[in-house]
Amino acid sequence: MLHFEWHEYALAAIAFGLCFAIVLLKSSFPRLSGRAGDLRAVQSMHKRLTPRVGGLGIFGTLGVSVIFAPVSISGAYADFILATSLLFLVGLSEDLGFHVSPRWRLMAAAGASLLAIWLLGVWMPRTGIPGLDAVVDHWLVGIPLTLLVTAGISNGFNLIDGVNGLASVTAIVAAVALSQIAALAGYTTMVHLAMMLAAGIFGFFLLNYPFGLIFLGDAGAYTLGFVLSWFGIAVLINAPEASPWAILLVLFWPVADTMLAIYRRSRRNADVSAPDRLHVHQMVMRALEICILGRNRRQIANPLTTLVLLPFVIAPPIAGVLLWNQNQNAFLAVVVFGVLFFASYAAAPGLIRRFRR
């Protein structure tokens, strides 16, 4: 059962306050809204320049949350936030208009994970895959796997951050789901950390949805993916009965979207890091415009896309919580959701053509 502490309300208020201040200052500091060319970017789904530094609110609350962390892990948690700051600063540079390529951002995510591994002395302990689990404990296997997982999920949250509220609500659901798995496993420390993260994201969400007054930006999206992936690893380390596949269910949406993007771009012999307009949320938004709302109704279609996708975003994490200690069943759930995800994406273009206005 969810229980909210006073400091979680305080963290939500801090995130909201920081983001609200940024919205008020955007005219005085144009760089907060990135580059004018951002509206012409291939993946752009918005029509006006908007502050892209909502990550400042997210990271600010992460820093403050160190004060409220359980005393037993406050030092390690502070070290983790220090490692996270490397990725945050690289993402913030991109948000402020200093071009940082996707490859450099991925390298920053891997570098931040290496720093976390060095400071904390831990990495992903198991995968739920027989055979691989026998060797993942060795650093030659475990560390590269950890870098791949954490950098991939960090990038995944950046990929789904295309319409108002989608990335932030996905992150809130994931954080709450991790807190519930931790509660079921008796890992109370993560219950507190994950709920504090959810509270900070919620403060940002209030200004991001539905009107898009501020965006996460790369700093916010990469930071959320990085923190959530490491929180998942922490659950696996401290709750031996927790299934890695259940953690994957919690983070299913950004992982599935990333895998689909890699497959889609590889088939076209395109650069896998090159942006496109074929993500699931982009397809849904165009379907709403073409089939229901009509053209030039993006201010409605954008937030409505998040509402349409919400059941599909929430369902896998719910399954992850229900199957948190059932490795085989959690694996089967990943397969089922994966098949549904890819099959519905493949069917979408035909359905749009059939029902277009």
Image (spheres, rainbow, N blue to C red):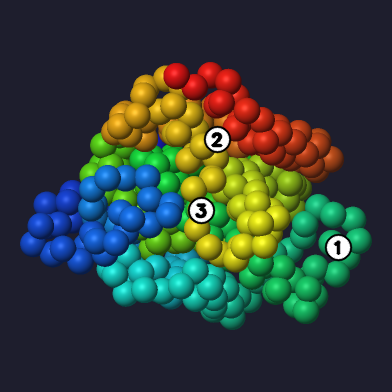
Name the one closer to the observer, 172 or 1: 172
288 vs 198: above or below:
above
Residue at 36%, 69% (x, y): give it. Answer: 94
Q: Give the number of marks.
A: 3
User: Residue beneath label 2, please?
Assistant: 313
In the rendered image, which quarter is residue 148 located in?
Answer: bottom right
The spot of residue 164 in percent (x, y) is 36, 40
Q: In front of the other: label 1 or label 3?
A: 3
The answer for how far apart the CA atoms under marks 1 and 2 are is: 29 Å
Residue at 55%, 35% (x, y): give it. Answer: 313
Q: In front of the other: label 3 or label 2?
A: 3
The amino acid sitting under disc 2 is Val
The answer for how far apart the CA atoms under marks 3 and 2 are is: 21 Å
Residue at 62%, 62% (x, y): give it. Answer: 270
Mark identifier at residue 258: none
User: Secondary structure beneath disc 2?
Assistant: helix
The spot of residue 20 in percent (x, y) is 18, 49
Q: For mark 2, does the 10 Å Cα neighbourhood hold few (<14), some (14 to 19), or many (20 or more) residues?
A: many
The amino acid sitting under disc 1 is Leu
Q: Is residue 17 left or right of residue 127?
A: left
Q: For mark 1, does the 10 Å Cα neighbourhood hold few (<14), some (14 to 19), or many (20 or more) residues?
A: few
Q: Earlier in the sequence, mark 1 or mark 2?
A: 1
User: Residue beneath label 1, please?
Assistant: 132
The spot of residue 83 in percent (x, y) is 47, 74
Mark 1 and mark 2 in contact? Answer it, CB < 8 Å: no
The answer for how far apart the CA atoms under marks 1 and 3 are is: 34 Å
Q: Is residue 94 left or right of residue 264?
A: left
